[in-house]
Image: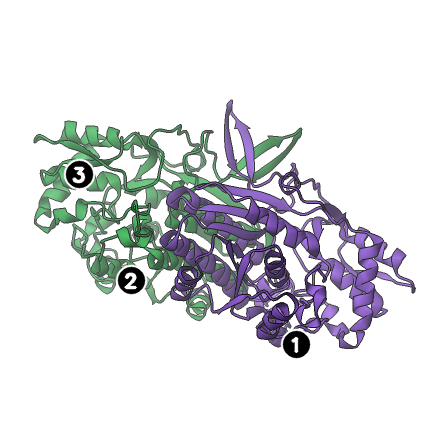
Chain colours: A green, B purple
């Protein structure tokens, strides 16, 4: 069975492609290398060096004898998108090919527009291409738990049974996210749900939590197979960033009170969740949503865990929260559907964090501590300057 | 007080600009003439001839002595958008400047992408421009009742009190619309609500029903002040189209059973609703939603009303519904907030419909009956062709 992984050169797309290939799927990866270009723009690099895509693919072939097809191009180009799908004829498409950083989307007007154009229009082109080439293709789309925001009621998996004035309906769960990036995923979800109704497509929207970790069973088989490890304030996910700060003797920076709670998961569970979604497709016309995370943590809870585990003394520093988000809030989110399909979570353990300490120690010379500092603020500054004027990235 | 009307050359933007000017506001209109270019693309024209914008503005000045400033440009151009707002320094911005046809958005991939880019990115640029130039500007944005779809519970005005597992929250009303156009307005609503939270903007989202009628107190003061009257299957609103069919001796075409129910309003109420929203601004940081319609009708109910009133015999013909929508559904939508502000509705009466018969009779020679036929289908045809292959517009 053929699976096309869009964004297959990225932090999670690459390990997913390997995991699917290792599990017997015939895999192609597509990318426009946008993620690598953000590094150049931001003056950042992956802590762990990553090989060019061609070298990665060759490395996988050397280790396993399996090949990965490669498509280079951009989903905002509808001709590229349609022809790629016609050529490869996949049974499933895993779609990671979006700008994935909330701070990046909030740098200024141009970055907000880029993020929503790239993500929403790219996905819209993909929906039309699937409808035109083969509506039976199962779309497995990466969403985010951030789409929901932090409502004062339990978060369900995409849909909510609503009772109102004596009547009931099953409705799309109301979304109220916290950045133009997260909004782009909300827009995607609405567009995809409609395409399932209007064009009869089948889709799984995976509302993923914050991913931590850097190694999977497949990426550790050869240095050329390593995936990214981002620790900067724009693209670094929180646990990875805190680990790097600890290793460098830098205070662990926590935004606001650190009482914000988020769903999180191990990178090894990400790749397995994708495999499970591909192996158990949605029905024709079905728009289904899985919440893809395994545990809930507060940011301060993570910082304290790292402080306790790290062998040297570590400080925790709270900094003004650059984001607009509730410091304290109710948070309880359902996440049973992937468990029902057989997911066996890697819960966050001392072992995982200690392995991240090891990875970081090996590459410590690569760390640029200036990248820890959040430079993108959500709000306009107090007086005459607008929101675009407060970013100093680039 | 200065008010900037974006899309001020369109069907409703133009009469709104006149109504605000007549009520003492200092008004500027902005347009990129996209609506006139769709005519050329579709081979259609307004039944009632409309003057070029410069002539319209001159006509208004001749009749009233009042001037309207004009800005020519495109909201997807962020420099134009920001400089226009900086130059005119409005206290309120009324935003009609979007592609407003569901069928147009469903012609093919290119029209879906155009609609979402034009509408969503244009509005996103506008949010950044307001935040940068003056966050106290009140944004009055035209949404659509179509954003809600046809849920099985009562439709409220933008927000919904939700109880779930013993907890409650005030949430954005869940949206599940029926075209990529309607989706563009859903995306706008989410982006605007976030901008109110993050940038402290103030916004009124007017979820408007289907507008009928062609004359307002101001547009009838001079022939150069007339607004559009569209009767084609792409841009014509349903009541206006049915009236033109009756006058031409064409069967009144009703999609499906005609039992679809929609909220509707008179064009004279549209312009007054906008005035009321401008005169009673949202609070700083507030995202409020008004449902802007006055009565609910089924499409078949409208057709039967016209058949009864028209002096010659009229047939009603049901045609295959080109849209994906429920033929029969619950529909009950709140619409009290504009009434609370003082709206005194023009309910659909024999007089209004008869005046539309008169307008149509006067311009009957302009009618092209081939434009009645719906040529845009929502779904892919049965076999090998994709959704883009079924449109024959243009």
Quadrant, the N terminus of chain A? bottom left
Q: Which of labels 3 and 1 is toward the front?
A: 1
B360 w.r.t. B379: above or below: below
x then y, percent, for residue B347: 76, 48
User: Which of these two is toward me, B6 or A92?
Assistant: B6
Give me the residue at 39% from left, 41% from top.
A146
Specify whether B67 is left or right of A370. right
Label 3: which secondary element: helix
Question: What is the distance, in whole Å, between disc 3 and disc 2 at their CAs?
Answer: 27 Å
Crowdedness near tag 3: few (<14), some (14–19) or many (≥20) residues, C-alpha within 10 Å: many
Q: Mark 2 sits on what residue?
A: A33
Question: What is the distance, in whole Å, between disc 1 and disc 2 at their CAs?
Answer: 42 Å
Q: Can residue A310 be seen in this view?
A: yes
Q: Which residue lies furthest to the front in this view?
A: B65
The reply to whether label 3 and label 1 mark residues of one chain is: no
Tag count in the figure? 3
A186 w.r.t. B76: above or below: above
Q: Mark 3 sits on what residue?
A: A243
The reply to whether label 1 and label 2 mark residues of one chain is: no
Q: Can residue A202 be seen in this view?
A: no
Chain letter belonging to callout 3: A
Locate residue A238: give its quadrant: top left
x then y, percent, for residue A142: 40, 49
């Amino acid at each position: 069975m053929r699976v096309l992984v869009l964004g297959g050169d990225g932090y999670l797309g690459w390990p997913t492609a390997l995991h699917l290939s290792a599990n017997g799927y015939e895999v192609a990866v597509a990318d426009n290398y946008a993620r690598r270009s953000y590094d150049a723009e931001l003056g950042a690099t992956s802590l762990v060096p990553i090989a060019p895509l061609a070298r990665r693919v060759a490395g996988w072939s050397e280790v396993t004898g399996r090949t990965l097809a490669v498509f280079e191009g951009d989903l905002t180009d509808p001709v590229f998108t349609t022809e790629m799908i016609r050529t490869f004829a996949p049974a499933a498409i895993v779609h990671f090919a979006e700008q994935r950083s909330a701070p990046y989307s909030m740098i200024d007007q141009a970055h907000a527009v880029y993020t929503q154009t790239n993500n929403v229009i790219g996905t819209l082109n993909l929906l039309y291409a699937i409808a035109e080439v083969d509506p039976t293709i199962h779309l497995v789309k990466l969403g985010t738990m951030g789409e929901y925001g932090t409502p004062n009621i339990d978060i369900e998996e995409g849909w909510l049974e609503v009772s109102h004035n004596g009547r009931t309906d099953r409705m799309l769960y109301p979304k109220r996210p916290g950045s133009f990036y997260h909004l782009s995923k909300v827009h995607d979800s609405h567009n995809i749900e409609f395409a399932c109704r209007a064009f009869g497509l089948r889709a799984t929207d995976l509302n993923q939590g914050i991913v931590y970790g850097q190694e999977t069973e497949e990426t550790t088989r050869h240095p050329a197979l390593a995936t990214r490890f981002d620790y900067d304030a724009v693209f670094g996910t929180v646990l990875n960033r805190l680990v790097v700060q600890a290793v460098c003797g830098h205070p662990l920076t926590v935004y606001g009170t650190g009482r914000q709670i988020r769903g999180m998961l191990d990178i090894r569970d990400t790749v397995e969740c994708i495999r499970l979604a591909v192996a158990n497709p949605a029905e024709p016309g079905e728009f289904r949503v899985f919440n893809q995370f395994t545990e809930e943590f507060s940011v301060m809870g993570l910082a304290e865990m790292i402080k306790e585990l790290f062998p040297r003394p570590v400080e925790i520093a709270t900094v003004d929260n650059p984001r607009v988000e509730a410091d304290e809030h109710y948070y309880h989110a359902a996440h049973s559907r992937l468990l029902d399909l057989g997911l066996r979570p890697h819960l966050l353990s001392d072992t995982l964090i200690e392995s991240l300490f090891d990875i970081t120690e090996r590459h410590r010379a690569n760390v640029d501590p200036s990248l820890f500092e959040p430079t993108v603020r959500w709000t306009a500054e107090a007086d005459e300057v607008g929101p675009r004027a407060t970013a100093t990235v680039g």
